[in-house]
Image (tube, coloured by chain):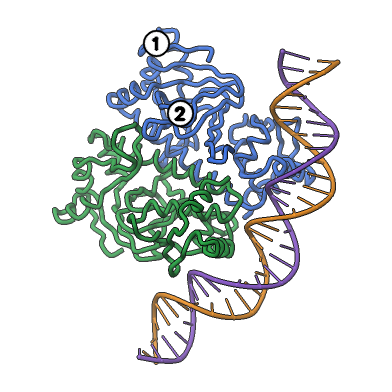
Chain colours: A blue, B green, C orange, D purple
Amino acid sequence: VLVSLDGTTNPAGAAGAAHRRLVLRGVPLLGSTSPGIVDFLTETHRHRLARHATVEVFRRRDIVFREGEAADAIYIVSDGVVKAFRHLPSGKRRIVAFLFAGDVGGLPESGRYINSVQAITPVTVCRLDVGVLTEMCDNTPGLEHAFLCKIVHELRESQRHAVILGRRDAAGRLAMLLRLLEGHACAGDGIPIPMTRSDIASYLGLSLEGVVRSMGRLKRDGIIDFHGRHEARVLDRERFDALVSAL
Amino acid sequence: VLVSLDGTTNPAGAAGAAHRRLVLRGVPLLGSTSPGIVDFLTETHRHRLARHATVEVFRRRDIVFREGEAADAIYIVSDGVVKAFRHLPSGKRRIVAFLFAGDVGGLPESGRYINSVQAITPVTVCRLDVGVLTEMCDNTPGLEHAFLCKIVHELRESQRHAVILGRRDAAGRLAMLLRLLEGHACAGDGIPIPMTRSDIASYLGLSLEGVVRSMGRLKRDGIIDFHGRHEARVLDRERFDALVSAL
DNA sequence: CGTCGTATTGAGGAGGCTCAACTAAGGTGG
DNA sequence: CCACCTTAGTTGAGCCTCCTCAATACGACG
C-alpha cells in the first residue's frame, strides 16, 4: 500500500484524485438507446464518494484483502486487474472472478470477506469504508441503485463464468476467456492476457498444462497467435467465433 | 397461469395473499448476532409490495419467462423450485441456477431477460412490475437495500456454483449439489431432489449418465441412500463431508 | 550472470463422454 | 381400469480428452 489516506474526509487534493477514479461500469438493467456498457455513477455520486474514498496502490501479487477477514471496506478497481479467489478445504485455490477497472470487490457476508483478492498487475483501487458507504447510500439518491446495477452485472458475469465451466473442451473454455479479455482490450490491438497460465487454469477449471496445450492447439490451427506470454491476436475471426459459440 | 391479477393496486384479499408470500431470504452483508439466513424484507416492505404484487401459479414444466423477452417484471419465488437456464448457440441449454422460495429471478439486462425460468415443481411466485418496483424503491426506505442484499447473496451462490463446476470428479460435484439441497430440506428428513437427473447434469456440467453413475457409486459406497428418484439420505455423514470438502 | 517462478513438452493412465439398448414411471384416452 | 405412449432413468462397451508426473526451457529480476 503506497497511498493510504484515512479519516472520514479527504483533503481537496486526495478527493480530486479519487474523483476521476470512481467508476462503476456495467450493462444497465433497463433498456436504453445508449449502447452496452455505461458508468452507473453520476457526477454527484462521484463527488460525494470522493470525499471519503481512499486511493490505494498495490503491486503485482499484493493481497488487497483476505477471505474471512472482517470486511471493513469495499473496493472499486480503478486501474489494473485483480483476481478474486476462494481457498478450498484441500488448500488449493479457485479463481472465482477477474476484476477490471470499474468492477467492485469486497462484498461481505455476515461482515466478513467471502473471498481473497490479489493484484495480478499493478493496481489502483478506491477503498470505501462500509460504514461511511451505507450512510452515504441512505442520503444520496440513486447511489445504492448504482451499486445494485453493478452487482447485478457481476451476477451475470458470474453466471457466464458458470457457463464457461460447463463446457468440456479445454480449447472452447479458453476461447471464451479470450473473448472476455477481448472485451477489456483497446480496440484494434491484440488481446492482453494479464494473468499467468496458472491463473487461467484456476479460473477455467483446467490444469496448467491443459491451458498451455489448448493455446498450442489454437496457435497450430491458425486461430489465435500468441505474442510472448501476455498477448493474443485473433487470426481467424470466423473460426474463433465458431469455437466460442460451439457446444 | 391460474391466478393472475393485474392492475396497479390489488384488492385487499389479493394483497393479503401476496403479503405472506413476499420473502427475500439470504445471508446478510453485515455481521450480526443472529445466525445465517434472514428475511431482508421488513413488514412495511411486505405491505407496500403486496399492494402491487401479482401472485401467479405455475405447474411443472411451465415457463415463467423466456430469455430475450422484454423484462416487464421481476419475480420472487414463494413456493416450489424453478430452474434458470441459458440457451447456448448450439441449441443446448445450461442451468445457471435453481431458485427456491425466497429467491428472486428475472433481473434484466438492457430491459430483457438474460435467462429463461421454468418450473420444476408446482410453483407460486410473486410478480413485481419493474416500473412499479423501481418507483417503490424510490420512496420506500430500505427496500432497494433489501434487494441489493439478496442479489449479493445470489452472486455468492453463483460463485459457489462456479467452484462446484471447477471440480473434476463427478461424485464430488454431485455431493456438493446434495449439500446445497440439504440446506433447503426440513431438518431431520431426507434430502428432497426436486429436479430430474438431466437437470442435475445440466447444472453440474456432467452428462446424464455421469450423474446416474455417480449416484450409483455414492450408494454402493454406503455414503448416500436414494429412495425413489427424488429423495436422498446421508448414511455416512463423515465421508459425505469429506467428499464435499475434497479437492 | 545466477536464480526462482513461470512456462512448455512428453509419456502414461484414469475418468467421463458417446452411443446404444433397455427398463421404469407418469399421463392420457379408450 | 387398463393399454398404450411418452418421458425419465439405467446400464454396458469403447473411445477420447484431459490430468498427473516428471523433466526441461524460458525470462524477469536482483
Q: Is residue A6 left or right of residue B222?
A: left
Q: Which mark is residue A140?
A: none
| Residue B195, placed above or below residue A13 | below
Asked whether residue B156 is in view, the answer is: yes
Front residue of B232/A199: it is B232
Within the image, what quadrant is residue B4 found in?
A: bottom left
The residue marked by circle 1 belongs to what chain? A
Label total for image: 2
**Amino acid at circle 2:** Leu
The residue that disc 2 covers is A24
What residue is drawn where x is 41% and y is 22%?
A128
Within the image, what quadrant is residue C7 found in?
A: top right
What residue is drawn where x is 34% and y is 64%?
B122
The residue marked by circle 2 belongs to what chain? A
Q: Secondary structure at mark 2?
A: loop
Circles 1 and 2 in contact, beta carbons < 8 Å: no
Asked whether residue A236 is in view, the answer is: no
First in sequence: mark 1 vs mark 2: 1
The residue that disc 1 covers is A10
Label 2 packing within 10 angstroms: few (<14), some (14-19), many (20+): many
